[in-house]
Amino acid sequence: MSLTINDVKRIAHLARIEVSETEAQATLVKLTGILGLIEEMQAIDTKGIVPMSHSQDVVQRLRADVVTAVNQREAFQKIAPAVEDGLYLVPKVIE
Amino acid sequence: MINASLKEMAAALSAKKISSVELTQLFLARIKSLNPDLNAYITLDEARTLAQAKLADVRIAKGDVAPVTGIPFAQKDIFCAKDWRTTCGSRMLENFIAPYDAHVINQFDHAGAVNLGKTNMDEFAMGSSNETSYFGKVKNPWDTTRVPGGSSGGSAAAIAARLCAAATGTDTGGSIRQPASLCGFTGLKPTYGVVSRYGMIAFASSLDQAGPMAKSAEDCAVMLNVMAGFDERDSTSLQRDKEDYTRDLNKPLAGLKIGLPKEYFAEGLSAEVATVVQEAIAHYRKLGAETVDISLPNTQLSIPVYYVIAPAEASSNLSRYDGVRYGHRAAEYTDLLDMYCKSRAEGFGAEVKRRILIGTYVLSAGYYDAYYLKAQQIRRLIAQDFEEAFKHCDIIMGPSAPGTAFKIGEKADDPVSMYLQDIYTIAVNLAGLPGMSIPAGFANKLPVGLQIIGNYFDEARMLNVAHAYQQQTDWHKQMPEGME
């Protein structure tokens, strides 16, 4: 299947990445090449095969329901782009 | 001393022949003279490094020593190290000062090792040539017009040029083994889950695994003893008894069955590399090993499967970079959505964006079954290939990469040809198996790596197999001209 320039823009929007018109064109060429590579998979019959996400037969561990994280607000906010009174600043979203 | 093994360095430190501060200064001086050209390190912090060396000397004076106490290591810039700038090779994290330590960093610190600095890498570990780093290309010390491989290219160049005693790396699709091959040293990717991923900046979580990069197998064994172990902070860390990875180093190889996958010696492998690899395998026969022909029929599919799974997981992992809590934020924007879109457009490089877009596409509504699910199914077939193969052999050998180091810029504009660099390494990540690359000789004066693939948790045996070869060859001791 082939990708269009509108597909690239739609995917970029979903990924929250701004792309210019020229970038979208160049991206289309590269993505088409990569998707061509991926298409090789479609020749394989995978009916009934259980998908594999982990090589070992493991289950998620449970831990005691107690607080383990300590409050490090100051340390974490020191590296934030914009903070005020212990809050992260972003553009207004509600009028 | 720069070419000494970790054991020899530890012995010299214990015998007070050299102090940790002196040993550290020796490497810092080499970094000062050689790094401006090679660009192996992104961040150096001499004061912090020397303070650690002084503490190590205090420990040594008290006799409180672990096998790596006082030895200076380079850390790939993917590992968060408290108060160190940790960039992951990206503009997104250009000014990110890590507020905590990765498990791997913790382990080295507790053992009294010295952190020499943070090494260059492909942006977010996405690349096979170290050309996607925001902080510039890294040069291969064997030929500075060529790439060191990637994504752990800075660690690779630092080891080849002896700008550290050894280094750490991470391997999602070959990022330890391919640079080890291209720069002529020993690198090991452990079984998935053996080394904690806590504090290691995530690329593709079901494939990412950290491992040692060093001159020899013995050095890798010493480092793996430091790095491996259960960590409850990583939900995929495996709960196993602690192992001593040096325990089998000197076992004889007689009777060892080596499987040679026909797919690893087929079209696409350079003839010069094939010759070197075959000579290394012949050497193993002399050591008493026997070889059997095996097949890994789904090898070719590992690349398409990987380029669905890795970008899918990356697109999800990298969604955290939103310009709100940390990382790059655009200077100008109209609203919240525009702030996200501009911050991410500016913060990520071209290859990272491509992978996020591919991942977003394959996970988007209507495509999940055709891509991600299908890839996870073929992933099982690939793992089953190995399961079947290990019924007939103890260990698998082949090339680590299809060629030697290529020219800087040669593949930079062609992602698909770059992706094919990892044809012999990716399947190992998909199956979750351990793999390593050891120096096996040279083709046209460039290093060639032999790949050794083991069954799950067979790292000690792989290190034994590599060590036996390194006792009889000196490929791993050779240094690039002009770097002595």
Image (spheres, coloured by chain):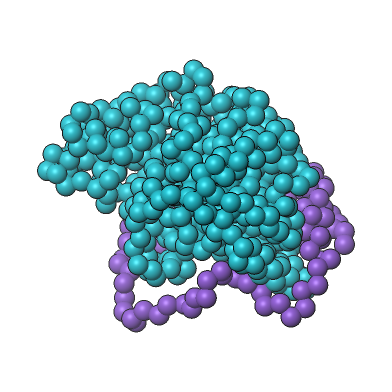
- Which residue is found at the position 43% from the left and 38% from the top? B471
Chain ID for cyan: B
How many labels sit on residues?
0
- Judge left or right: residue B465 versus residue A5: left
Which chain, by letter, is purple? A
From what the image shows, is residue B299 above or below residue B230? above
Which image quarter holds the N terminus of chain B? top left
Q: Nearer the viewer, residue B291 or B267?
A: B291
Residue A42 lies, in percent from the top left, at 82, 66
Left or right: residue B359 compared with residue B148? right
Q: Residue at the spot x=36%, y=79% of the render? A: A63
Q: Residue furthest left?
A: B62
The residue at the point 31 percent across, 66 percent down is: A71
Name the residue located 24 percent from the left edge and 48 percent from the top edge.
Answer: B66
Provide residue B186's location: percent of width, then percent of height. 49, 41
Determine the image quadrant of residue B32. top left
Task: Name the foreground residue: B68 vs B273.
Answer: B273
Q: Is residue B192 in sight in this rendering?
A: no
Q: Residue furthest top?
A: B482
Residue A74: where, in percent of width, then height?
33, 57
Q: Is residue B64 left or right of residue B115?
A: left
Q: Quadrant of the C terminus of chain B?
A: top left
Q: Quadrant of residue B282?
A: top right
Whether residue B158 is situated above or below residue B324 in the rendered picture: above
